[in-house]
Image (cartoon, rainbow, N blue to C red):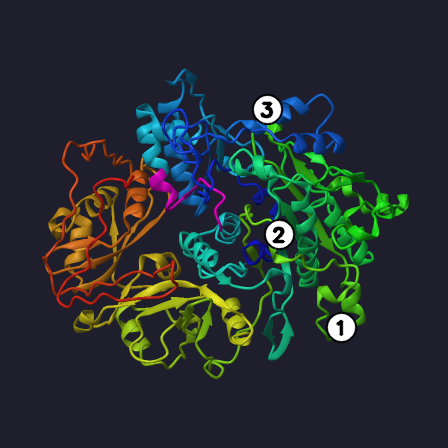
Amino acid sequence: AGAEKRSSVKTHRRFISRVICVSSMGRKNRTRQRAQPNRDGRPEGKRNRDDGWGAGYSEIIKENKLFEHYYTELKIVPEGEFEEFMEAMREPLPATIRITGYKSHAKEILHTLKEKYFKEVQDLEVDGQKIEAPQPLSWYPDELAWHTNLSRKILRKSPLLEKFHQFLVSETESILDMCAAPGSKTAQLIEMLHSDMDIPFPEGFVIANDVDNKRCYLLVHQAKRLNSPCIMVVNHDASSIPRLHFDQDGKKDILFYDRILCDVPCSGDGTMRKNIDVWKKWTTSNSIHLHGLQIRIAVRGVEQLAVGGRMVYSTCSLNPIEDEAVIAALLEKSEGALELADASADLPGLKYMPGITSWKVMTKEGQWFSDWSEVPTSRHTQIRPTMFPPTDPEKLANMKLERCMRILPHHQNTGGFFVAVLVKKAPMPWNRRHPKGETPAEGNPSVPDTPDPSEVKKDHVCGFSSVTELHIDMKCSVCSSPPPPKKMKLFGFKEDPFVFLTEDDPIFPPIQAFYDLSPDFPKLNVLTRTREGKKRNLYMVSKELRNVLLNNSERMKVINTGVKVWSRNNDGEQFGCAFRLAQEGIYTLCPYIRARIINISVEDVKVLLTQENPFLSKLGDDAHTQAKKLEMGSIVLRYLPDPQDLDAPQCPIDLCGWRGKTSIRAFVSRNECLHYLRMVGVEVFRDKQGKRNDGSTETEEESTEDAEGLSQEADLLEQEGEETEQNANGTEPVSSTCDGPTS
């Protein structure tokens, strides 16, 4: 049951344009009993990557008579379309691409996709199937999401699509989103905050929550691709996520959120196209068991929503017991404090069905109930009054349930989803009656009890990431931190506490002098996770997140926050500074750096990212002259676009680098390296023999020149949430220039 619980989410742009993330991702393997071999010699139950969808089970037949009977009766599909609906559900989900990251960088990748890769794949024929040109999703803004007719199997197996496949695999690590794994919705919310890359610290912030500790680290991994100082990942049960406090004008106040995304755990029958286990395991009891949990999570969300704020409730289930019934229960409990918003105009081109106002409840044995009065006493612990539509016609009409949105797979070749937008008009009635207390949702008799953990369906876990964004202009708390919290142990992982630096911390003067930081550099936003001994890494958060951290250290289980901006380099002390720049935080930090910057050209970018340790003389004359004037140590390599050269990238690029005795190098991860190379027009492609497209054999080189440069450091171990260092005194870190994309 714990793995099923997720929590509430928030953002300050129009949410509905960031709800649906179509995917062709397959499911994890399941433990199965050993069985007789199939005709092809494979054991029963073993995955065959070449089967229909490329990630399915050959023995699963895409049929479920109970499912068909149930949805035929409920009439959620327009008359005459049910066969088309079922045919779509049996087809594999096509690959869909969403371009992420800073808008200016996204535009460059979009240009590459449209002018090169899309043109190369269109009109090809693979296994008798004609490859159609990818098309932009009409309802998604700025052509940043594209729909294909390519299955994952075709993408992976066809030699004709190999370059396109390698491009997708590589770019997914930095700027493409190809799946609905934990963090996809979180990523979209962060992107909205950072739409303008000239603003390093947007006012809003995102809090992403997951009850599953391991999934929290997947959230961290996804969020880390966006390198934002405005993200915090926490680990709580969504139905009882703590109320947070913040400092406003010297007074403690309760933190209410302007936007909440409440993407609850669900039965997931809208995911049958990619999660084919659902065909065999689908039953109406899954929805009945989850209904109470979904209401409790939604209630906890609206309790923490600011008056005037919006909460999106979403599932990947088509079942009204998990959808309209939950919304109707919320509206009834709110006594007018909530209302459904009409979001029909927010995404022109999105095809959806309006919410329904009449439905029935069916047991797994096939018994139907149209009203609570028909339910026998023996079933009152399983079937609850909130599962039925309101019986009062006037009350039902006032709810405007038709404003809910149900996306059906056959209408635009997607999965199935349900979305509802709620606006909070006034405090919730129990909060009005108890304004100072935190009345728990489970204290209200109209909310069903939590189902027994053994009864909750665990096969489907929504891509739930409870995200909050706040854009209240809060003042910073006092300069000094509160008493140090104890190290918190979370499900086996020990998390070091966050420690904010003070303005007079002795760590700042050498950094300030070396990089000539501007006077407005926010020192109070710098933190570390090392209380004792030398600080290994320095991170930065926005002032709003600092406020939240300082005022809630005892009540929040924080897994990760902020973005790394500096890493310790013990050997660099001899050059004037013990900290080198970290690529993750370069766009956050660069607006404050006024020294150690080398302006480079497109050709310089190519040299730095394709050569392991180039001599200074390999740079263009201008960059070479600048580099010779600098002492050894960490540097910023900055490309600024030339509006007159439209063939070159029209967005700024900042790279972390190191100025050695006679050479210079960039410190960029392999996938970022490939990403930037493509932006400047270099295609790095590896064929089946491991050779690059220029004919040379791929090798991994280790440089020894300028060995007195830096100590090697290991990045954050995201899967364990710990940091480690691998010291190798007297050696530079191996630069991440790349010879070809990883498979």
Q: Residue placed at 43% from the left, 64% from the top?
A: 562
Q: Residue placed at 63% from the left, 52% from the top?
A: 455
* Of the pair 126 and 32, the residue shown nearer to us: 32
Region in magenta: 169-182
Q: Residue placed at 61% from the left, 27% from the top?
A: 410
How far across and how far down the image is residue 27, in percent? Answer: 47, 41
Residue assigned mark 2: 456
Q: Which residue occupies the extreme front position in the image?
A: 36
Q: Which mark is residue 87?
A: 3
The reply to whether residue 340 is in sight is no
Indicate the amino acid at tag 1: Pro
Q: CA distance from mark 2 to mark 3?
A: 29 Å
**Left of 2 or right of it: where is 100?**
left
Q: Is residue 147 above or below residue 357?
A: above
Q: Check whether the beta carbons of the residues at disc 2 and disc 3 lie within 8 A of each other.
A: no
Numbered disc 1: secondary structure: loop
Res 31 → quadrant: top left
Q: CA distance from mark 1 to mark 2?
A: 34 Å
How far across and how far down the image is residue 19, in percent? Answer: 58, 44
Image quadrant where one finds the C terminus = top left
Indicate the amino acid at tag 2: Val
The reply to whether residue 235 is in sight is yes
Indicate the amino acid at tag 3: Glu
Q: Earlier in the sequence, mark 2 or mark 3?
A: 3
**How many other residues sit within 10 Å of disc 2, few (<14), some (14-19) or many (≥20)?**
many
How far across and how far down the image is residue 40, in percent? Answer: 37, 25
How far across and how far down the image is residue 451, in percent? Answer: 67, 56
Residue assigned mark 1: 435
Foreground mark, 1 or 2?
2
